[in-house]
Image: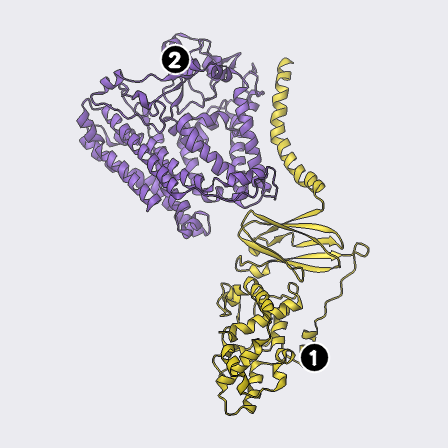
Amino acid sequence: MTMLRREALPIIVTLGIMLGLPAVLLGYETLIRPAVSPNRIVEIHASMPQNGGFGPDVVHVNQGEAVTLRFTADDVTHGIAIGPGLGVDLGQFDPGHAAEVTLTFEQPGRYTYYCNTWCGDDHWRMRGVIDVVDPANPDAIPAPQRDPVIEALIAEGIDIDEIKRRPEHPDANTASADAGSRMIGDVTIPPQIEETAWQRTHTPQQALDMLALLNADVPKASLMNVVAYLWVRDIDPATLAQGRTLYQKNCSGCHGETGGGDGPGADLASFTPIFSMTIDTLPRRGDVLYAKIRRGGMGTGMPNWGTVFTPEETWMLVDYLWTLAFRD
Amino acid sequence: MTVPTQPSPAPDLAPSLRGVPLGLSFPLQGGDSQAWGESRARPIDLLARFPVLKRMLKSRAFQPALQWFALAGFTLAVVAGLIGTPAGNRNFGIVFVWIVWWAALMLMIVPFLGRAWCAACPIPAPGEWLQRRGIISRIPRRLRTLHYHWPRWLKNIWLQNAGFVLMALFSAIILTRPNITAWALLGLTALGLALSMMFDNRVFCRYVCPVGGFIGLYATTAPLALRVKDTDICLMHTPKDCVTGNEYGYGCPWMTYPGGLTRNVDCGLCTECLKTCPKDNITLVWRAGGDELPAPREYRLDEAYKAFIMLGSALIYPVVFLGPWGWLKNWASIGSLTGWVLYAAAFLAITLGVLPGVFWLVSAVSAAIARPRLPTIQWFTRYAYALTPLGLAAWVAFSFGFVLVNGSYAISTLSDPLGWGWNLLGTAGVAWTPADPMIISVLQIGVLMIGLVSALNTAYRIARQSHEANWPAIKAALPISVFMVAFVVISLEMYLG
């Protein structure tokens, strides 16, 4: 009996270590930590898509509820951003490190958290969804967002998914906006070409053809410089900077840092357009680029970004794409 | 296989070098071995000098207290491995097992305290407690096991050698993936538990544990040792309480007769014999490391091969883990099955074939020079013991390479052991801070040099066991010395090249 009494404490200590310690750890994580946190914490583990991607990849949040999303990179360096329109970019973080953000969603809807740092071949698949519901009407399905630009293209009969390949007989091989700016006063320019709205619904090639009709004595290469200038002239520096940031974080993995189609993921796509060369840019329309970015490129491996970027951000990207070919 | 020898008078231990690890007991004077023996430094009796230590070691709570401390770390490592972040550098299981524990083991415990870790190791503890049906108290009953007998042909460290090689082949994933580490720890514990249910005492530790094998070998170089004060007292004391146990403690769980202890290999420092000895004839001594290396009662091929396995691993690991060759790391991490098979084949070939093969050749040259003539196998086995301090030095150098680079992860992991975003101590955000590469290089060069000097000295002392005169012994040990120098040159080339 004395022996048993003497062994009682050691047995309690031993069991306390072997069973109590894990219980304390789990209790702290599941009970104490949420209890002392001012708002709900959602732990989201980030792995390469081939390792499982985000876990969880769907988060349900009530409208008006403050929620802390804590992302932990489990395998390689990831970068996390949330869109559209939230302006949340948590930056890059290495394996084992965490980054968090606390958000309050005022409207029901669907948001996307995604990796914006090249993390592997299937990087672009690394996305998760935040479903924000109205607690008073949790089963309501948010109305699909309409996009007038895409609707207009469809109405016009434009094939958004047509792959624009390099023209066989290009009118100009290179174009310089700087050179164009120096001769802008020496050519006759139809007024509509200078309008942003017109430029977004027409190709540089169409503008070049119109200029050629009015300026028959000016070489086409020079007129192409004028077109290049007109296409980038009205882009304000702030928009350009934002477009550049969006491009470098989200597009350069496939399209390359300078639009050369030479990013690490380029070989994984069936077709990767080049934006750094004038001849590849001539037949493109801004609104079609916009639509491709938002819808994704069918059959090309281009993911859809409409769930990630706002329309304004998408136009910033389109504007930046023109500068890749037209800026010196 | 064993190779019996005639023990010879112990060589000199320079008094100023008492307590130096890595088996460094370099003779500072010439002359024959008898002359050295006369000037030999006496080991310090630690228990006589520190009575508090004696009282502590005699307490039955001493070992369980160590084991509880280690068990807490073990439990946390397993939990973190199973449910914590898979990122190794943020997971307690990886950081505290393979960086903190490994650093403590290889840089401090083994070189200075020998098998002290075995006294604290939590892996065999549950099995031992179940055997005894008690944790602290001396339960006066027979151990509860199936009382099977461990096969005689396995009473060696070949199983430990095989276990270490097996773990070494998968070490790239064990060392980097927390869940694999957790399962490896649990697997070893389950094995220890099963063996404790089948066999009396610490069969797992003595014959199976893959870590215990090399700790035992390298413990022979450590200054700390448990020894009897007077062997005559043991001889005359027929009850042998240290073997049978008494009301104060259990019979030696390591199945060793303390009265005959001349080497640290088979003593787990559990201190049961300190408690049971009615004659107060057992103590802890602090001595010149490596004293026991050249004079075991028998030179054993299983221990010799352990030296090669450790030496070969210490040569391969820096290349794989610290080198710039990603493809090699990928092979070792089983990035492709073919790659891993090639890596495993190369690992086995180098550690079990090439290295012993080259050593066999230099042993054959030594055998040709030596008088009296002995078969090459005997010289091969004897001289392999001289590789012990060199192997330990190589492992210490390798450990410096990654412990000092990755050690700072421990600070952040303390605050967030599971990688769940905690910040318990406010240190979760401490950035990774690797040590200055120059400092690491200096330490590596220094420890390799100490290991080389000690190994050369040991080889010479082994040669002196068969050569009365100085110069013939030097000549006999020369080929072995060339092998050792070549090893150090290659190691330095790896670390500094």
**Element carrying mark 1:** helix
Quadrant hosting residue B281? top left
Q: What amino acid is at disc 2?
A: Lys
Percent x, y for residue A95?
A: 54, 49
| Tag 2 residue | B229
Front-most of residues B276 and B240:
B276
Q: Residues within 10 Å of mark 2 (few under 14, many from 20)?
A: some
Q: Give the vertical position of B27 relative to B241 (above or below).
A: below
**Element carrying mark 2:** loop
The chain coloured yellow is A
| Tag 1 residue | A155
Q: Give the vertical position of A251 relative to B50 (above or below).
A: below
Q: Residues within 10 Å of mark 1 (few under 14, many from 20)?
A: few
The chain coloured purple is B
Q: What amino acid is at disc 1?
A: Ala
Number of marks: 2
Quadrant hosting residue B351? top left
Percent x, y for residue A250?
A: 57, 63
Percent x, y for residue A222?
A: 49, 84
